Amino acid sequence: MSKNVRVRFAPSPTGPLHIGGVRTALFNYLFAKKHNGTFILRIEDPDQNRYVEGAEQYIINALNWCNMPYDEGPGKEAGFGPYRQSERKEIYAQYAEELIASGNAYYAFDTSEALEEERKNHEEKGKTFIYNWHNREKGRLVNSLALPKEEVLRRLENGDDYVIRFKSPQDETLNLTDIIRGDIKIDTNILDDKVLFKSDGMPTYHLANIVDDHLMEITHVIRGEEWLPSLALHQQLYTAFGWEAPEFAHLPLILKPTGKGKLSKRDGDKLGFPVFPLEWKDPQTEEISRGYKEGGYFPEAMINFLAFLGWNPGTEQEIFSLNELVNAFELERVHKAGARFDPEKIKWFNHHYMQEQDNVQLAESFKQLKSELSTIDLEYIAMVVALVKERATFVNDLWELSHYFFQAPESYDEKASKKAFKEGTKDLMLQLISILQPIEDFTVENLQTQIKGWITSNNIGFGQVMMPLRLSLVGALQGPDVFDIMFMIGKTETMKRIEKTINIL
């Protein structure tokens, strides 16, 4: 690309960052890095009434946990700040006035009551009220296009409440282009005159968004599908200002796992999965919402999973590192159709990344999780983790898979006992004790040689020995290789557990 690519992720700090917002941030990040560009975080907080304490820091923490730090944004100034819209209020008024001066916008003094009355009148006639070319100058609506100039000045000087509306054109066809959706044609007659600015000095999203994108030299706007209806207005604003518009790409919705509609927190609550990257505690209600981090998911798994919600590489490959995603990512390969959220698929990704984790680091997390491990040597825990993690999806799965390495079984699986404990089992276990007693080299290899040799030379069925042996050590017919277990727990503990079995037979 000839331009220096600059993209922005622009969330509102009104609560925790939804997983859909993380996907939007990810696609912006991948595109920026693919083209050696700049990934910008801009906080869109013009409506301070909706501001939630802690939400901005939550957004920053979430991006950092996902290994997607922003290049520019709050705390990382680079000549385009400030990066919070609430700190840019003075900027927007001049651009609103510029639109009025050029004839592309106008003052509207209509009260909310009057507008509601207009809506009701239209509904009674089976029509939809649209504030635009067909009624803005007919005298029922109170604006600077219909009022005498002197009356407009008088109202402004009196401090009457007003909004500044964009003057949408009549009888025009807008030819728009979206990287994902292709060419789009819009009849301007169906567009309403959107509010851009209010007399309290605050812009609406539409004006602030366009002005900031221009001043921050944004080259590509990558955002959710919900903003597609605003594309016509935004393109018109660029034209009205005489600015070059960025390229637009509207991402598909993330859909519910089942049924229709987009993914919501309610779906997560109902089906038992998080919809936020990090845990969130509502500062007012103190309600706690689960996060993927606290749920035991690895950021690599979540990023890999989210990348496939609406995009595919055009190959059979599913496992991608972040760098591989950067290299493979193309906006042209993003789908138009909504992407269904599959909570089982992200578990599949997490299981994969579980296998790639360093065993010592996993052991540290495991030890912190279980008080029973507080006095156990970390190196030993790491060796256990290495043996069982292939069956684990989360760190908290490790205890269920490995508790017998740390504690002798207190009982035996009933179904397994019927299968393993037969009439001759006690005698075989007594013989096994006699085999183990003289062994000093209690290694996996030597144990295999000694025990398998005894079984083979005496024509004993392997299952007759190995099943009750495993049940003695584990309490169930599960776990890694029996000889690995024996080596790990040691000779004394092995014999102790076998003797316990003998005593109950």
Image (cartoon, rainbow, N blue to C red):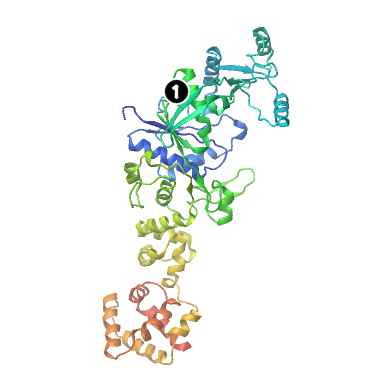
Q: Is residue 331 left or right of residue 272?
A: left
Classify the position of the N terminus by image quarter. top left
Q: In the figure, residue 100 lies in which quadrant?
A: top right
Is there any visible trace of residue 377 in the rendered image? no
Secondary structure of the residue carrying tag 1 is: helix
Mark 1 burial class by Cα count in 10 Å: few <14, some 14-19, many 20+: few
The foreground one among 359 and 86 is 86
Residue 280 rendering spot, x and y as whole percentages: 55, 47
Q: In the figure, residue 470 lies in which quadrant?
A: bottom left
Most extreme residue toward the top, as rendered? Answer: 150
Above or below for 464 versus 154 = below
Q: In the figure, residue 483 lies in which quadrant?
A: bottom left
Residue 35 rendering spot, x and y as whole percentages: 33, 35
Q: Is residue 285 left or right of residue 323?
A: right
Q: What number of labels is visible?
A: 1
The foreground one among 494 and 315 is 315
Q: Which residue is pictured at 52% across the width and 15% down the height? A: 98
Residue that mark 1 sits on: 215
Q: Which residue is pictured at 50% across the width and 48% down the height? A: 278
Is there any visible trace of residue 356 in the rendered image? yes
Q: Which residue is pictured at 48% across the width and 32% down the height? A: 42
Above or below for 132 versus 389 = above
Q: Amino acid at mark 1?
A: Leu
Residue 500 rendering spot, x and y as whole percentages: 45, 84
Above or below for 501 versus 229 = below
Residue 44 rendering spot, x and y as whole percentages: 52, 32
The foreground one among 1 and 496 is 1
